[in-house]
Image (cartoon, rainbow, N blue to C red):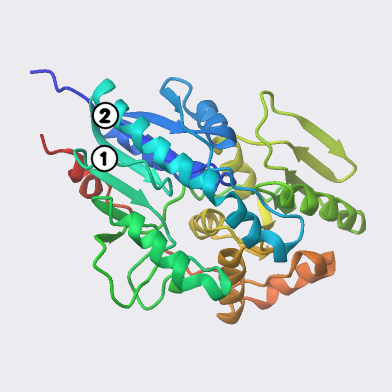
């Protein structure tokens, strides 16, 4: 008797590329476990997943209109200013998903931080490492609002461990909660490979504009003083991949997961943002790094400070960064090696019910 494959909607938020890239292993495992993933997002996140999974169905969701300010202190106010558009997008995607549930006969929904992508009649999961949403003096409001939305989902998957030693700290761990939280371990699209070191430094950029471009300009200026071999990934998803050589620097606009996996494994040290998806990748590949958190993004600043305080990795504010600071990497112990595999079958049981 032929098994009927079930359709599962996978919908990451388009905010940088981290939400999309950490959905890649989930999409791969859904296919391995006899499900049919349907991908939904917008902007660069959707463009990236189209390149990774050209054989799958791709649907477009409304944009959350998340924008960064040029000055860190204006970041929160920019988010507040755009919040009516974000709320409108959340309400809109809820209606769209209701229609898709009937149209595609969905048996499950996996949303990565898209707050309106759920349906009460379909098992719905939200992936987030931010049960607490840091926003300065308004942290308690932003956290309560996020938790209010999380309650609409059947389960909440947190890419971390529920242990004394964990990676998300107070972001992903609450003292008291009635949320249906499942700690799923390290979520990364990459695998460690024993490859010869080809580059002394990888610069890995990501995140929304204008901060991505501001850091790119600063780093190219700083790299003039660096005479070792560098691979520089700009994190701009375009139709065609572009490669340039600028003296000792090999530059790419973007890389596919397979290419990036090789390049990181071939790199001695990584210079990057302290985004949570990047952190998961560094843990998986057992790489040492130096962080430059996105200015004004409380989550990245908290994670960078937390890892420095724990003696794991150093960081610098974007405005203060100098290439000489990379020497500090040797003074830190790096991430601990994690050997616990992901139990995909256990996670996907939710979608097996008739």
Q: Residue 280 location in percent, x, y?
A: 49, 57
Query: Label 1, on which residue?
Result: 119
Query: Label 2, on which residue?
Result: 101
Q: Residue 185 location in percent, x, y?
A: 36, 59
Which of the 4 image quadrants contains residue 105?
top left
Residue pictured at 73% horizontal, 70% vertical:
316
Q: Nearer the viewer, residue 128 or 49?
A: 128
Q: Is residue 27 visible?
A: yes
Q: Is residue 175 above or below residue 56?
A: below
Which of the 4 image quadrants contains residue 37?
top left
Q: Is residue 339 visible?
A: no
Residue pictured at 34% horizontal, 74% vertical:
163
Q: Is residue 93 above or below residue 249?
A: above
Residue 345 lies left or right of residue 141; in this view the side is left
Q: Nearer the viewer, residue 195 or 218?
A: 218
Residue 212 lies left or right of residue 345; in this view the side is right
Name which of mark 1 and mark 2 comes first in the sequence.
Answer: 2
Q: Residue 63 location in percent, x, y?
A: 53, 37
Q: Quadrant of the N terminus?
A: top left
For label 2, the crowd category at 10 Å Cα-Cα, with few meaning under 14, some 14 to 19 and many 20 or more, is many
Q: Nearer the viewer, residue 130 or 66?
A: 66
Quick one: SS at disc 2?
A: helix
Q: Residue furthest left?
A: 1
Gap in Å between the C-alphas at discs 1 and 2?
8 Å
Q: Residue 22 location in percent, x, y?
A: 46, 46
Residue 136 lies left or right of residue 160; in this view the side is right
Quick one: SS at disc 1?
A: loop
Q: Quadrant of the C terminus?
A: top left
**Pointer 1 and pointer 2: residues touching (CB < 8 Å)?**
yes
Residue pictured at 24% horizontal, 60% vertical:
180
């Amino acid at each position: 008797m032929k098994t009927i494959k079930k359709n599962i909607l996978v919908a990451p938020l388009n905010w940088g590329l981290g939400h999309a890239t950490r959905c890649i292993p989930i999409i791969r495992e859904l296919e391995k476990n006899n499900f049919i993933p349907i991908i939904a997002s917008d902007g660069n996140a959707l463009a990236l997943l189209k390149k990774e999974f050209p054989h799958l169905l791709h649907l477009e969701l409304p944009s959350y209109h998340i924008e960064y300010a040029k000055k860190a202190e204006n970041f929160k106010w920019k988010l507040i200013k755009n919040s009516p558009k974000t709320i409108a997008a959340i309400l809109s995607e809820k209606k769209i998903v209701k229609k898709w549930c009937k149209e595609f006969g969905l048996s499950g929904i996996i949303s990565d931080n898209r707050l309106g992508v759920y349906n009460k009649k379909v098992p719905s999961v939200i992936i987030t490492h931010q049960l607490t949403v840091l926003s300065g003096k308004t942290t308690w409001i932003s956290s309560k609002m996020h938790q209010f939305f999380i309650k609409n989902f059947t389960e909440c998957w947190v890419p971390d461990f529920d242990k004394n030693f964990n990676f998300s700290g107070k972001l992903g761990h609450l003292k008291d909660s009635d949320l249906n939280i499942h700690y799923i371990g390290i979520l990364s699209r990459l695998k460690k490979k024993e490859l010869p070191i080809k580059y002394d430094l990888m610069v890995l950029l990501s995140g929304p504009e204008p901060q991505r471009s501001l850091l790119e300009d600063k780093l190219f200026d700083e790299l003039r003083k660096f005479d070792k071999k560098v691979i520089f990934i700009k994190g701009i998803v375009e139709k065609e991949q572009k490669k340039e050589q600028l003296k000792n620097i090999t530059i790419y606009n973007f890389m596919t997961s397979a290419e990036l996996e090789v390049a990181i494994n071939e790199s001695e040290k990584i210079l990057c943002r302290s985004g949570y998806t990047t952190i998961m990748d560094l843990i998986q590949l057992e790489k040492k790094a130096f962080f430059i958190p996105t200015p004004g993004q409380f989550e990245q600043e908290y994670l960078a400070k937390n890892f420095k305080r724990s003696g794991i990795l150093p960081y610098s504010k974007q405005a203060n960064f100098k290439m000489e600071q990379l020497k500090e990497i040797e003074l830190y112990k790096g991430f601990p090696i994690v050997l616990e595999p992901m139990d995909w079958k256990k996670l996907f049981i939710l979608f097996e019910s008739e």
